[in-house]
Every structure is written in C-alpha cells, then in structure tokens.
Image (cartoon, rainbow, N blue to C red):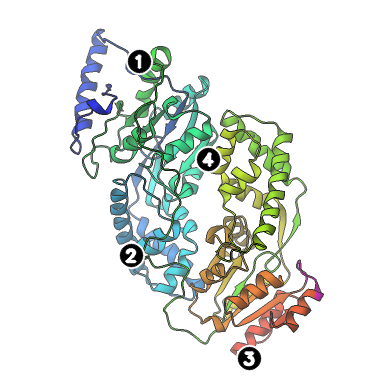
Amino acid sequence: MTTAPRTNEHRPEIPLAAPVDTIREGAAENSAAQRSGTTPHHPGAGLPAPKALLLDFGGVVLSTTARASWAQDLAERIVRRASPLGAALEIGAVQDSLRAGRTALSLWKNAASRRLAPRELAPQEIVADFLLADLPTTVRRGLALDAREILAEMAPLVAEHHLRPGITDLLTECATRRIRLAIVSNAHSGRAHRTILENLGLAERFGVQIYSDEVGIRKPHPDMIRLATDALGVSPQEAWYVGDTLDRDVVAGRRAGVGAVVITRDRRTDHPPFPISETPDLVLDTPEGLLAPLRAALEHGAIATTPETLGHTGTTHPGVEDGAEPIGSRGDGPARARPALLLDHGGVITLSVPNPDRHRELGGRIVELSRRVGAPIDQATAEGAVAEGWDRHRARKRDRDGGSDPAHRHDEVEPAVLWGDLVGAGLPQALRAALRLEAPQLSLALHRGKSVPAPRAGALELIQWCHDHGIVVGIVSNTISGRGVREILARYGVADRIGPAAYSDEIGVRKPGRAIFEAALAGLEADRADVVYVGDKVLNDGVGGRGAGIGTICLLRGGKDSDVDLEAALAAEQTDHVLASPADVIDVLAARLGSDHAGV
C-alpha cells in the first residue's frame, strides 16, 4: 500500500497495467519499513478526512466466482418464458445467443467507459439487442418486456458472490465513527445486487445504493458519485470512493472531485481496456487494508479542498440510439388466425381491498431512510409526505390527461419524480435525493402495501383455459410497479401462463396511450385484428384498445366504471362486449376457435 500523486499535473501517463504494478512495489517497500519500525508517515495521513465512504459493489464489497453452467441454466429459463408466447425455442440456440450477447455486451461496456458521460443501456436493450439478439423477432420483443426479471435472474446464475476480506470490519468502523455509506456500482440488475446485500444482512448499513440500471447512467459518469453524495448530504470532496477498476472507478472519482480515490485490487484491476492517465490515491490488495489509512486520515488528515473537475453535465436518462430498432414496434413475423388474449390486471385478474395502514407503513420506511442518510424526520412528517405526495400525483394525472400536448398526455410518472418531487416536496434536500434513488423500491413497497389483492372470480379459470387451448395471454396494465404485479401473479400460480406483459411504469406510458398497447402487441404473433382485449374502464381500456386497432374489446362489470357508462360505451362501439365475469370471455374466444371449444 502506498500513496500516489493527487494532482493532475503530477499524474504520469499510465499504459495498461503499469500503474498498479508500480504502486504495489511502493506498497511492498512501505510494508518493509513498517516491519522495521522506520515508517516515515501514516498511510492516508495526507488525505482529507472523509464524512462518507462510497463503495463499488463487485471488486470491493464482494468478489465473484464464475459459474460454468450459467448459459445452460439461463437458457432453460428463457425457453420456459418463451412458452407462454407460443414459441418453442431450442435450448442450444438460446445458449449460443446468450454467450455471444454477453461477449458483445462486455465489449460495449469497455467502449462506454471511454466516454465522458456514458448512459446505461435500458434493460430491454440488453435483453433484446444483446443477449437474445439471435432469437426470432417477435419472441425477442415479447421476452424483452420481462427484461428486468430476466436480468435479475441472470446475476446469481452467472457468478457466485463472496464477501471480500475486511468488509465487515470496515462497515463497523464507519458506523462507529458515523461515516455515511453508499454503494455506487454499474449493474445490469441493481435489484439483484440489493437482494444479495439483504441476504448477507448488509443492506441496512448503506444510506443509499446507486446502480446504473436504476439511474440511467454508468461510471465513469461523475453523476453516479454526485447522486450518492447529494443523498448523503455531503460534498464530493468530503467523500472517498473505493473501486476496483482504473477506467471506470478511478476516472469517475477524479471527474466527480472526490476527496480520495482508493482501489482494492480484483481480477479486472490489472487489465484496463485502454491506457488510463488517472491514478488512485491508494491501492490495496483487499478492503481490510483500508482501515489503517482511514483511521490515519481521520486523525491526521488534510482539510478537504475542491479539486479541479470536469463540468457537471447533469444526469442523463436512457434512450434509443439513432437507427436502433424500437422495442415497441410491430413484429415482422407472419400473422396467425388463432386469437390471442390481452388482459388488464386490476379489475380483471385482481380485485383489491384498500389497506388503511399503507401511509403508516410507507412512512416508517421513509423515517428509516432519513436516519440512514443523516436527515432524520419523524413518523408524522413522513406519513403526511406520503399522503400529500399521492394527492399531488392524482392532481398531476388530471392536469396531464386534460393537457393539450398529445405527445405527453399519457406519460407515466417516473418513480424518481413521484418520490423525490411529489412525496419529497418540503422534506430535507438530502432525503429528497435519497427518495429519488430508492424510488423503485418505494414504489414496490407501496404496491405491496396499498391494498390486499385477491383473484377475481373466473380470471384464473380463463387463463388456464387459454393455456390448455394454445392461446397466448398477455397483460396491459397501468401500475406503479410491474414487479409488484408479477409477484401477485406468481402467488396466484399463473406467472408461467403469462406472455407479453406491458406495465406502464416500465413502458413509460399509461393507458389509454397507444404505446403501452403496442409494446404488448409486439410480443404476439397474432395480428391485432385477432386479439381480444379485456378491461374494466371505458376510457383506458375501451377507447385505448380501439385506438390501438385491437380487433375485439370486452369490458367487465364490477370495476370502477358504472353499468350505465359501460352500456353507453357499447352503444358508442367503444367496446364489443359488456360481460359480467372474466369466465365469460371463454365463450368469446371459443367462438373464434369453433363451437367444440365452448365452455369452461
């Protein structure tokens, strides 16, 4: 372990692995001096004392061991997921596509780390354009709607994760000294990383966790680090960033202007994809070596100063590259006469009873988050923020729905806006920043806790009947958490019966907007004229389905719209059928197949 020059003027040009080897030679000399009792200084004593420690996930908190069977294991799951789409995939072909896609993805990541402010690929891009690029177009598009689920499954299949030496002691030291902690990591599935930390009992140690797939940018974009420092209520120069790569971690730390950049060596450290001119302040073999320099900096460290950094470009969001094939466009496969079925979720598959304790439960989560980021609020304040934020959300939807801009009239609220701006209005700035970062998890928690769901009578029978008769079933649903809907369907035991599922929080558009219907239709081999869509609301489902060109629309009684409104929609040809139960849809479908198929 040794210190390295801290200014750009004194950092030499570094070809490939040379800097790490050179620094390690200095570390060996320093260790020998320590053993002889002649060490001239405390390692880290010249570094600014940190108020926060930002840790990379892989290579710092955990190391990985590759699983040789990952491609086969994931391919088997992909084949099962494709079955409800009406596709029979060959497992060897899927394995080949996964391996080729992962290699290409690695090359893309290396190229992206050369950019000043790289964006992260959207989950659908990773799955459709890389991992499953060799599969038939319609199947690929249908599976891309489950991209987040596929990537969450992929992470633990690709590698085993092991806690690195010294991490537990380091986290304990930071807790004792009230040093705030965050994870800042490039990831295809932050959700999978969060689960790993929860299973290890470490999740609560961190004020926030920043993952590239959740914020839309990736290291070396400096805003990855600035998002963390904003949420922890510290400046970048008051934080140390600990990573394991030169091209992503060291460069990101320097661009963000952190107080110190530390490398804990891992398998990628010695092999950057191209020469890097930036150098770290400390290079350690494992995180356990960080305790001594951290203590030295806290006792003898310099006063933090603002280093020279690049301009703050602002957080970006993922988009489709010029010329890229839009995931939501219609497929080019042949149309089939066999019908397909698209269902709304709430009111059709599920009926719910509101949970009167939802504000209290969400408020408790926010109180705990506020404590972790050093901006504590009380329970009453948190509950009030949730209630008022939801009122703002409803008012915003009314204003948007009545707006004159057709391009954005049906935009779904981004989770970060819902929690950081609408719920977070009036809360401490650091807490608002943390709410934005934890937004997907909070939306999931709200979805889980806002009501008690139960399957609507006849819905599961309809799904099973379609499965038995080879009819693909998909979902088009407005929701704050598609992941939460998937959990409900899994509890019902029908998750493996569902094909293309388009959820508004994942597509970015709410019904009656056409884009959410198009996303589901793109995953069907059936022509839209042969699709039957079932909902319970005249505007969202009747008008929305008609606007998307779906052939048959069914609206169910017993939902939010009155029988009078439903009958008026039937008279106005905004729906083809008004039915009492999901089970009645079986007769509609059976008529398309022939009389022999009628009945439950």
**Could you say whether the residue bearing mark 1 is in a helix, strand or loop?**
loop
Classify residue 542 as left or right of residue 279: right
The residue at which mark 4 appears reads as 198
The residue at which mark 1 appears reads as 45
Which of marks 1 and 3 precedes in the sequence?
Answer: 1
The answer to whether residue 201 shows anywhere in this view is: no
The residue at which mark 3 appears reads as 596
Q: Position of residue 46 (x, y in %)?
A: 34, 16
The numbered mark at residue 97 is 2
Q: CA distance from mark 4 to mark 3?
A: 52 Å
* For the residues bearing labels 4 and 3, Cβ distance under 8 angstroms: no
Q: CA distance from mark 4 to mark 2?
A: 32 Å
Classify residue 312 as left or right of residue 582: left
The numbered mark at residue 387 is none
- Dot 3 amino acid type: Asp
Looking at the rendering, which quadrant does residue 163 occupy? top left
Q: CA distance from mark 1 to mark 4?
A: 34 Å
**Could you say whether the residue bearing mark 3 is in a helix, strand or loop?**
helix
Which of marks 3 and 4 precedes in the sequence?
Answer: 4
Which of marks 2 and 3 precedes in the sequence?
Answer: 2
The residue at 44%/74% (across/down) is 138
